[in-house]
Amino acid sequence: MANLQEIKISNTVYKIIDAMQNFRAEDSFIDKKNKLSRFQGNGEAKKHVGTYNGENKLRISNFFNYDKWGLEYSDPKNNRKTFDSAKAHDGVISENRCFFSKENMRRYLEDAKTEYFAQEQHYHNDISEYYNERVEKVEGLENEKIFFSIYDASDSLSQKQNRGYIRSDDLIWKLWRELILPSISYLSILKLVPKDNPNSEPLFYFRILLDYQFRNFQHPKMVSEEISKDLIVENLEEQSAKKSIYRIGADKYRRAVINHMPQCPFTKITDERLLIASHIKPYIVCMRNNEREQAIDHLNGLALSPTYDKLFDQGYITFTDTGELVCGTQLSPYTWEQLNINPNAKNKLRIYPEDRESYLEYHRQNVFQDNIADLL
């Protein structure tokens, strides 16, 4: 387990032995108050985590250490599967070894604040009315890690749908269904063991995350406002009078960034046609804060090839003030391997970090999708 990525949660360091990422929060699952206007019904409190046939069965079975998906049982009192009925039929997947983090919930609500109050999606209700109450509920949680149990709520084998679902009767399960917004949120589950006790029974860390473009600094409505105020629109006759939108000073900024940093530190590519001048502190933030000089400052940019530009731009990776790469926990070990990145390495890359410290600090605290203190 020496090469496994580590994460610190509430002062305990864990090894990430597996991860299941990017489970979308379906409208059918979230609390009815958050439902999109185009959907009806109350939904259900069970979460789809994959199918339990073929290779997919092996995947979710190995992840949860549970291979009895699709057991036919129900609680006679309400004709649905409950934790008690699951326990009576060997359908409990994990008892009191799953947990949510208070800090993760707090961060999710902060990220989602703009969508709560400047709604890009169309909801049945004005969800801004619920925001402060939900913040209070999260702040009122007594512990930083809130443990709960999950059980098999899958479709029965006789239904031949092979859809794997998990559910919990714990109150924290109800709370996170209240917090999350449909379509633009997703669930990540990390399978962990304590670093100092790697042979112990694994824990499952449930995290709620928000799509990059709906985070506060990148929210679609906020971006469209900035486009109307601060961007120049030019008509290009040679493209059938289509409009092309340019950022103020974009060409000059890009040239200055590449002159200062003429090579992508990951791929070593120097062909400037393949390099992107990636903002460290997002352009839209600089313009919104009337920091125009920062928006076109070449020190607020890194020259990256496209894949690595996306990783940095959307907060999957970041850098320390001395140029060390820091990888988040939102991608699978397989993905890191295909990217030729070792998330555990503390290698310094040639990003010329001098005089970029304030921009890098902003990126670590606001763009990077993990809590930087938990990974250093």
Image (tube, helix red, strand yellow):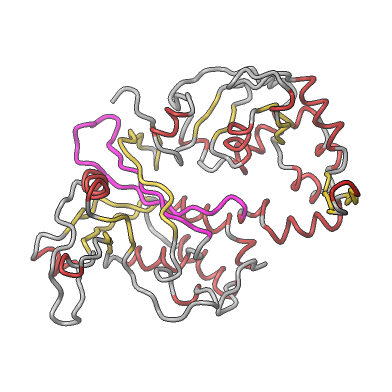
Q: Work out whether residue 213 or residue 271 is closer to the camera in this orientation and state it.
A: 271
Left or right of 164 on screen, residue 369 = right
Q: Residue 178 in the image: x percent, y percent?
A: 45, 69
Q: Relative to 16, does residue 59 appear above or below in the rendering? A: below
Residue at left offset 28%, top offset 35%: 194
Q: Position of residue 272 (x, y in %)?
A: 74, 24
Q: Where residue 34 appears, x then y in whole percent?
A: 50, 72
Determine the image quadrant of residue 263: top right
- Compare residues 226 and 101 and report the one nearer the observer: 226
Which one is nearer the viewer's eye here, 306 or 9?
306
- Residue at position x 68%, y 22% in the image: 353
Is 87 magenta? The answer is no
Q: How many marks?
A: 0
What residue appears at the point 82 percent right and 25 percent down from the top-left corner?
Answer: 256
Question: Chief secondary structure of the magenta span?
Answer: strand
Q: Quadrant of the N terminus?
A: top left
What is the magenta range? 184-213
Residue 318 left/right relative to 300: left
Q: Is residue 137 above or below residue 187?
A: below
Q: Is residue 190 covered in magenta?
A: yes
Give the quadrant of residue 269: top right
Q: Is residue 164 above or below residue 260?
A: below
User: Residue, x 28% and y 56% (percent of image)?
Assistant: 51
Q: Position of residue 304 (x, y in %)?
A: 66, 28
**Direction from residue 44 to residue 130 in the image, left or right:** right
Query: Is 167 rendered above or below residue 97?
Result: below
